[in-house]
Image: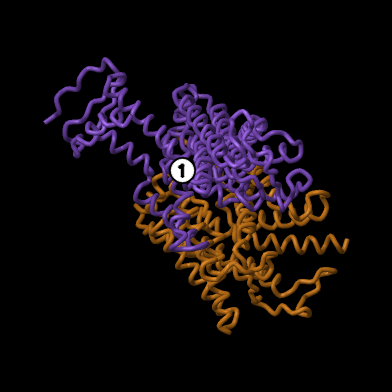
Chain colours: A orange, B purple
Amino acid sequence: MDVLVERLVAGSTEGAVYALIALSLVVVFRGTGTINFAQGEMALFTTFVAWSVIARDLPVWVALLVATASGFVLGALVERFLVRPVRKRNDMAVLIVLLGLFTVFNSLDGLIWGGETKVLASLLPNGPDDYVALGPARIYGDTAAVWIGTVLVLIALTVLFRCTRTGLHMRAVANDGEAAALAGVRVGRVLSLSWGLAGAIGSAAGVLVTPLAPAQLSLLTMLAIFLSAAAAALLGGLDSLVGAVVAGLSIGVLEALVIGYVPGVGSNLSETTVLVIIVLVLLVRPQGLFGTKKLERV
Amino acid sequence: MTTTTTPPAPAVAGAPPRPSARRLRLVIGSTRHRLLVLGSWLVVALLVLAATGLEPYRLGQLSGAVVIATAIVGLNVVTGYTGLLSVGHSALLGVGAYTTGVLVVQLNLLPLITVPAAVLTGALVGAFVGLPSIRIRGLYLAMVTLALAVAFPEVLRALPEVTGGNSGLSIPLRFLAPPAWTGLTLADRPLWTFLLCLSALLVSMLLVWCVLRSRLGRDMRAVRDHEAAAESFGVHVARTKILAFTISGGITGLAGAMLAMYVGALSPAGSFTILKAIELLSGLVLGGVATQLGPLVGAAVVVYLPVLLADVVQGQGSGVLFGALLIVIVFVMPEGVVGRLNKLWRQRVDVVPRGMPAPVADPP
């Protein structure tokens, strides 16, 4: 029983990580109908930026702010100058540009910061005694930071989309770009804002997540996380914020349980588990759990 | 020999530079057309002959490029002609390579005998990978295939008894020696490998050439251009997609078998990661999507560019340049090198079947 609780806590923490990145994917998808394949690597880049800030003896929250701001700028620039010009052409052009970015950012990280693994400090105190006991499970500072971060981002995004004029514009653009433009929405600005926002969320997630990641801060940190997050975003339905969080948590818990209880799979097939989840979701319910079904007209 | 290649050259070089000017007419089956075709084949033969005289190291490098070209030919079938984005071809390449590797190392079979098995498993896995494409496409399919590419090395690591796990497999050199009937010795191994890889490439290109001229080839392009319209005209979309993936998987599996013979050692972290899949896709885009010669140009670029740049930038730096190049290509030359050349050729030359009436005089 104690082991089960520990696994559930560990799984839902991992799930909160996926949920955060999935939220950034959802924000991009709602804006431009694109899956940002470079999201993970962009977040990795800004996380390295955060590491550099901390290495200059500045506090972690400053690093978080710097990373988030640079993530915003990066996302907005990528949308404006790389994605927007090719988006109308076809999916392949977008995919190639994003895979090119994926390669550029990953190699750039290696070029600037080197291949060796780095340790990123946690935002909340993370010593051996800094924990809250939850039954038999202990929640340390790094875990708590991820949970709090996910809840805050979800609330902030919900408020943004539901209660603000900007959010209304974003929803209008997602629904029908041309109609929104006719109604006076500055579509280009809204799209850049979506990507910037997604970049900011991804970057914040990167800083919060890295202290927990098994690979710490290395060139491989984000690949596995991005994959699971993408599975979460697909499972939740790519346009649903709540869906992303629910699916992220479910996938995290599911992974923890599969690794813990299915013999033979163990921790060395976690990415294959994710692959199976993605394929099943897309085959059985392509619109995801909470997504809106897309109609196609000829 | 050289004299036969010269006649078509002035005809091409003498063509007017502007598309609006008088275009060159080339009738299929005419002497001029035949000479041009013969000339191109002669150039190819001369190039191959010249390549066999290369020093072993350069020849090995060239074999590597030929293997990558074969894999890109396979990728072109699904992504180029059928319009299904695949970021998972590194896994199909790995399936072929590991089929050969496992059969040779575990069962002591001769590598050549394992080639059909590699093609077959490649085709089977390809068909299986193609299943999701019936319901999803575009970036969703790219997502699935990307997950496949990431999961594949993990599967290899999880089956250490078969695949050798993390340390991989190494094929003993005695299996890779040229067979006695060729008259080549072990020292000629690079030449033997090169000839094998080259035959694999030619067979693959011939297969694709035939497929494109068949009904299946037309169905594939119809599905790519407008799926719903193709279906309403009686194209069996699901079957077409699965067949495209099967053929593509077979060709990529063949490339994998060649890779196993050329490298001799296989490991999960080596040639079968997501980066290889991106490399294949890059080669396809650089060379020209849905062109028959594009894979050759693309493979040459992805294999030789890092080598050429090795003096200027090293390691990670070449990754940055490579990714940047990929983005630049999408912006300035989305049709790829061969696509652009084809376009220029079509602007200047009309290739028409025999018996076509002469064109009416140019409109004013």
Q: Is residue A239 left or right of residue B173?
A: left
**Label 1 marks which chain's residue?**
B
- Mark 1 lies on residue: B284
**Observer-nearest of A187 and A230:** A230
Q: Quadrant of the N terminus of chain B?
A: top left
Is there any visible trace of residue A169 in the rendered image? Answer: no
Judged from this view, the residue extending furthest toward the top is B355
**Vertical comparison of A56 with A99: above or below:** below
> Which residue does the image show at 62% across and 43% down from the upper left?
B91
Q: Is residue B345 left or right of residue A92?
A: left
Q: Nearer the viewer, residue A198 or B320?
A: B320
Secondary structure under the numbered disc 1 in the rendered image? helix
Classify A210 as above or below A258: below
Expressed as whole percent of the image width and height from the top left, the position of residue A50 reads 56, 74
Q: Residue at x 68, y 68 (%)?
A: A147
User: Callout 1: few (<14), some (14-19), or many (20+) C-alpha neighbours within 10 Å?
Assistant: many
Q: Position of residue B276 (x, y in %)?
A: 56, 49
- The reply, left or right, for residue B267 in relation to residue A166 is right
Q: Residue furthest bottom?
A: A57
Nearer to the camera, B120 or B50: B50
Q: Quadrant of the C terminus of chain B?
A: top left
Q: Position of residue A88 (x, y in %)?
A: 39, 47
Q: Quadrant of residue A166?
A: bottom left
In the figure, residue A192 lies in which quadrant?
A: bottom left
The answer to whether residue A248 shows anywhere in this view is yes
Query: What is the tally of numbered marks visible in this picture?
Result: 1
Position of A287 with respect to A189 (left or right) is: right
Q: Position of residue B219 (x, y in %)?
A: 47, 26
Q: Is residue A271 above or below residue A166?
A: above
Q: Residue B255 versus residue A296: which sits nearer the camera? A: B255
Q: Residue furthest left?
A: B364
